[in-house]
Amino acid sequence: QVQLVESGGGSVQPGGSLRLSCAASGSGFSITDMNWYRQTPGKQRELVAMISSGGTAGYADSVKGRFTISRDNAKNTVYLQMNNLKPEDTAVYYCNIVAWVGVRVTQYWGQGTQVTVSS
């Protein structure tokens, strides 16, 4: 079984920065893609950023140039550096990993962490 633990959310003023972390633990798994999603009440969860096992990153248009996703494969951890935050970035942020567990590909989700951007 794989468990994800997120940290780093909180409240910040517009223009501020936060760094989210998500660490995967368990045994018998091999991570491929690592992703960050976010969700606000009444809306669908949206993909914010993704990073492949080889380090190729992609971003939603709304966060390009402000957010940076990175990963530490030795620690099975993915990060999301969020700069120049805007009120519209307020959401619950979820990490998501895609992993091989034996011969199966499975997705796992973190518990979510609240990010609030407000003056």
Image: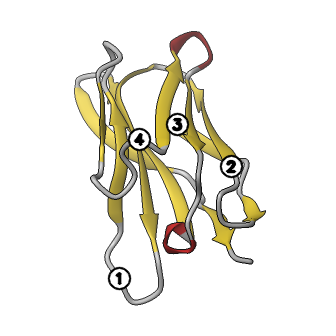
Q: Which of 61 and 92 is in front in this view?
A: 61
Q: Which of marks 2 and 1 is nearer the N terminus?
A: 2
Above or below 68: residue 46:
below
Of mark 1 and mark 4, the one earlier in the sequence is 1
Is residue 54 found left or right of 71 in the rendered image?
A: left
Relative vertical location of residue 108 with respect to residue 103 in this rendering, above or below? below
Task: Give the mark toward the camera: 1 or 4.
Answer: 4
> Counting residues from the N terminus, which is met first, the one under dot 2 or under dot 3?
3
Look at mark 3 in the image and give the residue it sits on: 2
Q: Using the numbered discs, state the Cα–Cα distance from disc 3 to disc 4 in whole angstroms.
A: 31 Å
Q: Name the residue under label 2.
A: 17
Q: Where 116 falls versus 26 (above or below)?
A: below
Name the residue beneath numbered marker 4: 65
Q: Determine the secondary structure under disc 4.
A: loop
Task: Give the distance between the C-alpha atoms of the residues marked 2 and 4, in whole angstroms.
Answer: 13 Å
Question: Does dot 1 land on a helix, a strand or a loop?
Answer: loop
Residue for badge 1: 43
The residue type indicated by label 2 comes to: Ser
- Residue drawn at x 36%, y 45% is 64
Q: What residue type is labelled 1?
A: Lys
Q: Quadrant of residue 13?
A: bottom right
**Residue at x 27% of width, y 53% of height:** 61
Q: Which amino acid does label 3 sit on?
A: Val
